[in-house]
Image: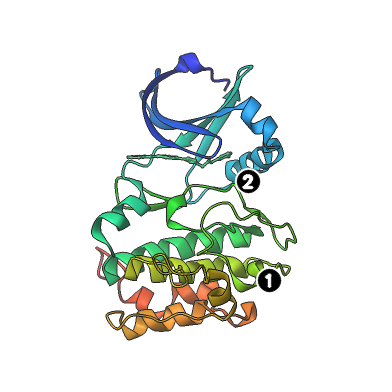
């Protein structure tokens, strides 16, 4: 179906991405609420991001998973490209984390289980995300996590250099050493995410006004897990933050890890 701007009532701005703004919008005939991302073509052209956009549209349009933000469609006029994206009613996971400093073990375990499910799904399609971090994660009405940004996802394995725009905290040792990398970099990022949700800060982030030692600490896998973190959670983080990618816990085993199983929602039907 061919959409144009006139099919939508545009609401407030939800956020400003790298190439454009996102607005809440209502599709007029159905009343369906979406997030409409507006990308300026001149901006895309200037930063040679058209190819990345095309790849992202292709990748995201073919992904169907409860924890991956849907791309319902896209259209353009002479100046803008419009992406009709799923609306996540609770917004950025990051804001919730900042607001409560750190999440409980139960809440973190559920988010990590949802992430692991989504990663198992995209890895099954030989897609690697490469940019897992709280800023790219949204929450829907039912507190379901939604991976929002596939700006850097590529088909595995990839040599493509990921220009470091944004946080370094989630870079894996093989990315820091500019080595060839495969989907196991998402396992490393999952370990960093688990650490950050449980403690409120990333494992290798530079201390406030300290010298920027992030790269060195990543390369040396130099991190300390605070005492309040349970032994099970510690075990999962350590099994993901392994320098050697082949030693990282495979994604299927993350889903059956004791710390993940013990916090699963009790199923209603206790058969
Ligand atoms: O650009 C993005 C990712 C993306 C998604 C979003 C985004 C941002 C915010 C929201 C929200 C949202 N809900 C909120 C509620 C409260 C406060 C803020 C909120 N943001 N829902 N859905 C969104 C989607 N920004 N950027 N995907 C993309 C880009 C190019 C091609 C493609 F196929 C996908």
Sort mark 1 into few (<14), some (14-19) or many (20+) by Cα contacts within 10 Å: few
In the rendered image, the vertical position of residue 206 relative to residue 258, given as above or below: above
On screen, residue 75 versus residue 209, left or right, reads: right
Q: Quickly name the residue at label 2.
A: 59
Disc 2 under 8 Å from ligand 1? The reply is yes
Residue visible at 58% across and 44% down?
Answer: 60
Asked whether residue 127 is in view, the answer is: yes
Q: Quickly name the residue at label 1.
A: 177
Residue 76 x/y as whole percent: 60, 22
Q: Quadrant of the N terminus?
A: top right
On screen, residue 77 versus residue 263, left or right, reads: right
How far apart are the two marked residues, 1 and 2, measured between alpha carbons? 27 Å
Quarter-wise, where is residue 35 in the image? top left
On screen, residue 197 versus residue 18, left or right, reads: left
Residue 196 x/y as whole percent: 39, 67
Sort mark 2 into few (<14), some (14-19) or many (20+) by Cα contacts within 10 Å: some
Residue at disc 1, secondary structure: loop
Quarter-wise, where is residue 268 in the image? bottom left
Residue visible at 52% across and 38% down?
Answer: 71
Asked whether residue 140 is in view, the answer is: no
In the rendered image, the vertical position of residue 206 relative to residue 245, given as above or below: above
Residue 173 x/y as whole percent: 61, 73
Residue visible at 56% across and 79% down?
Answer: 248
In the rendered image, the vertical position of residue 164 relative to residue 250, given as above or below: above
Residue at disc 2, secondary structure: helix
Residue visible at 46% across and 68% down?
Answer: 206
Q: Along the polypeptide, which appears first: circle 1 or circle 2?
A: 2
Direction top: furthest residue:
6
Q: Quadrant of the C terminus?
A: bottom left
């Amino acid at each position: 179906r061919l959409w144009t701007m006139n099919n939508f009532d545009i609401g407030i701005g939800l956020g400003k991405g790298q190439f454009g703004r996102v607005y809440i919008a209502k599709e007029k005939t159905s009343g369906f609420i979406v997030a409409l991302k507006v990308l300026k073509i001149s901006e895309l052209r200037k930063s040679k991001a058209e190819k990345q956009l095309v790849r992202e549209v292709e990748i995201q349009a073919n992904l169907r998973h409860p924890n991956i933000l849907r791309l319902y469609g896209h259209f353009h006029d002479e100046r803008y490209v419009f992406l009709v994206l799923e609306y996540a009613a609770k917004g950025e996971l990051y804001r919730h984390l900042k607001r409560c400093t750190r999440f409980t073990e139960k809440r973190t375990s559920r988010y990590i289980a949802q992430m692991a499910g989504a990663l198992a799904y995209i890895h099954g399609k030989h897609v690697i995300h490469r940019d897992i971090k709280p800023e790219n994660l949204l929450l829907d009405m039912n507190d379901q996590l939604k991976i929002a940004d596939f700006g850097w996802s590529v088909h595995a394995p990839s040599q493509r250099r990921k220009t470091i725009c944004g946080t370094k905290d989630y870079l894996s040792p093989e990315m820091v050493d500019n080595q060839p990398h495969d989907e196991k970099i998402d396992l490393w990022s999952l370990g960093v995410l688990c650490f950050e949700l449980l403690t409120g800060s990333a494992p290798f982030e530079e201390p406030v006004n300290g010298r920027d030692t992030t790269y060195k600490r990543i390369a040396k896998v130099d991190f300390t897990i605070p005492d309040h973190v349970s032994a099970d959670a510690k075990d999962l983080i350590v099994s993901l933050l392994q320098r050697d990618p082949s030693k990282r816990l495979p994604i299927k085993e993350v889903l059956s890890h004791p710390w993940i199983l013990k916090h699963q929602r009790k199923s209603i039907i206790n058969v």
